[in-house]
């Protein structure tokens, strides 16, 4: 009976761990919704990273 009480906490945690593992395999951080990041923001961010590499 006690185990039934654990399921609601266990299932989301197991899901979170499995997503973390899947994301790690793909070389990604846990994903934001794609709509949250516009292509221009991605371009700006990547150019910032490139510029940072050139400066150092």
Image (cartoon, rainbow, N blue to C red):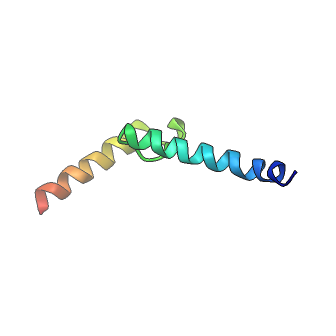
Which residue extends farthest front?
1
In the shown orientation, is residue 23 left or right of residue 51? right
Q: Is residue 8 left or right of residue 29?
A: right
- The answer to whether residue 34 is visible is yes
Q: Nearer the viewer, residue 45 or 20?
A: 20
**Quadrant into which the C terminus falls:** bottom left
**Residue occupying the far bottom of the picture:** 56
Horizontal arrangement in the rendering, residue 37 relative to residue 51 (left or right): right
**Residue drawn at point x = 19 percent, y = 58 percent:** 52
Q: Position of residue 45 (x, y in %)?
A: 32, 49
The answer to whether residue 32 is seen in the rendering is no
Counting every numbered tag in the picture gives 0
Q: Please provide percent x and percent y for residue 24.
A: 40, 44
List x then y, in percent, for residue 30: 48, 46
Q: Is residue 19 above or below residue 13?
A: above
- The residue lying furthest to the right in this view is 1
Closer to the camera, 52 or 21? Answer: 21
Which residue sits at x=50%, y=36%? Answer: 34
Image point 43% across, 47% down: which residue?
Answer: 29
**Image location of residue 9, percent across then percent down:** 73, 53
């Amino acid at each position: 009976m006690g185990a039934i009480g654990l399921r609601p906490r266990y299932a989301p945690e197991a899901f979170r761990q499995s997503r973390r593992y899947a994301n790690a395999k793909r070389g990604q951080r846990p994903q934001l919704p794609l709509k949250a990041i516009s292509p221009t923001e991605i371009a700006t961010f990547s150019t910032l990273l490139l510029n940072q590499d050139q400066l150092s």
